[in-house]
Amino acid sequence: MTEHYDLIVLGGGSGGIATANRAARHGAKVALVEKDRLGGACVNVGCVPKKLLWNAGHIRAQAHSGRHYGFTPLLGDFDWSAHKIARDAYIARLNGRYAAGLSDNGVTVIRGAGRLAGPGTVVVDGLAYAAPHIVLATGSRPSLPEIPGAALGLTSDAFFALTERPQRVAVVGAGYIAVELASVLATLGSDVSLVMRGAHLLDAFDPMLREGLMEALVEAGINIMSHRQVAGLQATGAELALSYPDGEGMCGLDAVVWAIGRTPNTADIGLETVSLVPDARGFVGTDAFQNTPVAGLYAIGDMTGRAALTPVAIAAGRRLADRLFGGMADRRLDYDLIPTVVFSHPPIASAGLSEPEARARHGADGVKIYQTRFAPLSEAFNPAPHRTAMKLVTVGRTERIVGVHIIGEGADEMLQGFAVALKMGATKKDFDDTLAIHPTSAEELVTMR
């Protein structure tokens, strides 16, 4: 016997849960299908555990910089194992909160691996469920390189299962995850090499951010190895060795972390039963309203290949639920001006267009740049201060601000309010007319000349 719902969501990550809860609050009968822990990658093996480790690194760095303020550093070695126990307990509480929230909203949670079984039908462990609306929110998983010995390395998911801090580590990759893991490991005392295929890390970011972060990582003691293609990974006893195509390599490693991208979880969810063909990389395409080419079938989050960020999946899912069940026919997510933060040490924050993107879109003569670089007051007594850099990208006669880019202490917390200003169409004059809060780093964004 088939059980019927108004909406079925495949995937209990942040986006899927947000969609289910919002639809249920609009009065829909909703089922959410998840085989693993609620919260998805972000809560269990991504944003949350990453930020907790970042906090640990930040505390350690602050404690050591305290000597410039007259404190004798009091922190000893970082107890990775104790941190993991506390971190796992915190995440377990979040899993429970998600379950309670779904229950409070009347969402039925179906445990197991869900697959499409034709239009409007999902099968879980042999039982069929039907709904006129089905949302695909199955997320993504870390990619592994197709090289000999790849399984000897750790994915970013497996990284969070480590019970001890590895002393000598190679992180392979140049994106968000690679930079964040390399940075936190170095801050917590590991000897880290960042192995990249190209010349730059974080290619999609403004050059000021890329270059500033590269400089900071080198100052932090991270060995940046650019233009390296990994050909294999070998084990000799307890140690690992990376090899390159030219015969060179790196040995004596305690761990290798693969951070080379993520693969959408679309291969085993029955797309063929509704004649939906993903693209060559496995992503499911959607229009501006999260519709797939199949009527009544929608997709959100990482599996769509569009801005793989947790807040994006949540916002897209909530707006989709508003449209389907809340009577808001035009409700959708605007993918322009998405703010984002990389939790490196120091953090970088970005919203809107980079300088090259702005020049490509608006023409070189239509773009004006304001930028600054300074030592924040927190570094006043440091003989070799860590510097903060900021850039505003403006376009047109009114100098409408289309990009805000920050690297330095507090960048992560600073950006949110300025992202609101961008969304509202603020101009450079609006920033100039805003009183500065002194002394702060944020004031530099409204005092640039």
Image (tube, grey):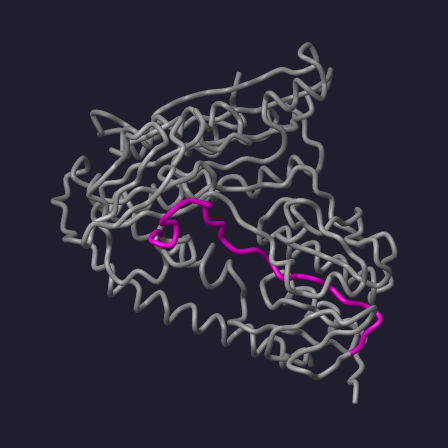
* Residue sitting farthest toward the left: 72
Query: Which quadrant of the structure image shows residue 376?
Result: top left
Q: Relative to the observer, which residue lies in front, 295 or 439?
A: 295
Q: Relative to the observer, which residue lies in front, 414 or 438?
A: 414
Residue in the picture at 36% in, 56% down: 159
* Residue sitting farthest toward the bottom: 1
Q: Position of residue 134 (x, y in %)?
A: 77, 67
Q: Is residue 433 above or below residue 315?
A: above
Q: Position of residue 124 (x, y in %)?
A: 67, 78
Q: Position of residue 84 (x, y in %)?
A: 31, 64
| Residue range (magenta) | 130-153
Q: Relative to the observer, which residue lies in front, 354 or 224?
A: 224
Q: Relative to the observer, which residue lies in front, 402 or 189?
A: 189
Query: Which quadrant of the structure image shows residue 196?
Result: top left
Residue in the picture at 27% in, 27% down: 385
Decide whether residue 134 is among the magenta residues: yes
Decide whether residue 128 is among the magenta residues: no
On the picture, is 391 further left or further right than 420? Answer: left
Task: Inspect this view and state whether residue 354 appears.
Answer: yes
Q: Position of residue 152 (x, y in %)?
A: 33, 53
Task: Inspect this view and state whether residue 58 appears.
Answer: no
On the picture, is 421 further left or further right than 26? Answer: left
